[in-house]
Amino acid sequence: MANAQGVKRKVVVSKESSFGTKPVKTSGKIIPRTESTLNTAFDSFSSEEIRENMQRSPSIVGFEKVEGDLKGELAAGQWSQFFSAALRGNWSAVKEAIVKKTSAGTGEKQGKILIIPETGHSTDSFTIEDIFTDVSLSRVYLGCRVSKISLDIQPNGIASITVTFLGQRGEESATAYFTNPAEITQSPKLAGINGQLLVNKQKAALITSFKMDIDLNASSEAVLGEKYAPDVFIGTVAISGSFTMYLQDKSMIDAVRQGKNLSVALRMDAESVDNADYITLILPGIKATSVSIDDGAKNLIQTVNFDAFPAVYDSESTIADELKKATTLIIQDTLA
């Protein structure tokens, strides 16, 4: 009997039209990954009965749900459907670059824009299939909603992304559900070295890392007479993070003490050419909540933690109306 190998495992994803119902078989796309921890999780409970034979009754298997992460490397296009689900909105038509690489944006690609909308929030769910081709096993996870997205961007490495899911239930089969899935469209990988970070719309020097969490605090509750939840609840979009930078003055300490409103914009390019694909992340309003300084026989680094809140990034924008609306996060992706 063959043993399953990670290199012969593939993860296929498709958005559901109806929660917990498989989409059409031809709609799946393969998501390249660095790791998948998706699994069906089962609650169990055991008897507390005290018995004369000093033994315990069999445990009972109860509520079923799907939990876990898809971890990967950040690229334009690859993760756009999950960003849309996390921000509970839809991508716009293509618009010119918000954060420009060249002085006037000449020769740069346009990209779609995503914000957290004021009304009409979406509640996207996905069917995710784990296909173990070497042992003829398919695990289909239904009703998967994005619970959290975490980004980790370092100056000398590929930016990483973790998408956390909470789903309704799983199914197993000897044959794959999705037929002939192709890999999802994506750019070359994005890295902190190919990009720029702006604080209050001014290019920030000596930033050494950037991290951000988009947390929807998803939950599912057991109900009597059912093996799995009728739905997965997702809450408000809470965004927080941190960035590290060389310690040069007390400006970040003052920002915390005085409760200053700041903005952060980060653009990452797939290549050095002007017409490269890119992703731009804009937090129109953040509050620095703490600053800590490390130590050692080296240049000292300060870590600035922040929370994001809705604010207007550009009230007089000629690029897109989305930039004139109060929102917690703006994303632009050339392959969305």
Image (cartoon, grey):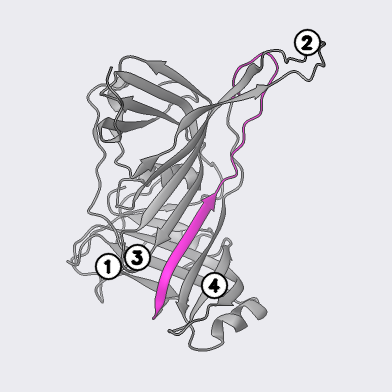
Question: Magenta stretch: residue 224 in it?
Answer: yes
CA–CA distance in space, label 3 to label 1: 8 Å
Does 33 appear above or below 318?
A: above
Judge the density around disc 1: few (<14), some (14-19), many (≥20) Cα neighbours within 10 Å: some
Q: Is residue 119 left or right of residue 111?
A: right
CA–CA distance in space, label 4 to label 3: 19 Å
Q: Which quadrant holds residue 261?
A: bottom right
| Residue at numbered disc 3 | 267
Res 53 label: 2
81, 173: nearer the viewer: 173
Residue 260 place in picture, x, y as percent: 61, 77
CA–CA distance in space, label 3 to label 2: 67 Å
User: Disc 3 or disc 2, which is closer to the eye?
Assistant: 2
Does 281 appear above or below 183?
A: below
User: Disc 4 or disc 3, which is closer to the eye?
Assistant: 4
Disc 3 element: strand
User: Disc 3 or disc 1, which is closer to the eye?
Assistant: 1
Res 320 label: none
Residue 32 place in picture, x, y as percent: 29, 41
Name the chief secondary structure element in magenta: loop
Disc 4 element: strand
| Residue at numbered disc 1 | 194
Residue 220 place in picture, x, y as percent: 62, 31
Does 242 appear above or below 30?
A: below
* The residue stretch that appears in magenta: 205-230
| Residue at numbered disc 4 | 304
User: Can see residue 162?
Assistant: yes
Amino acid type indicated by mark 3: Arg
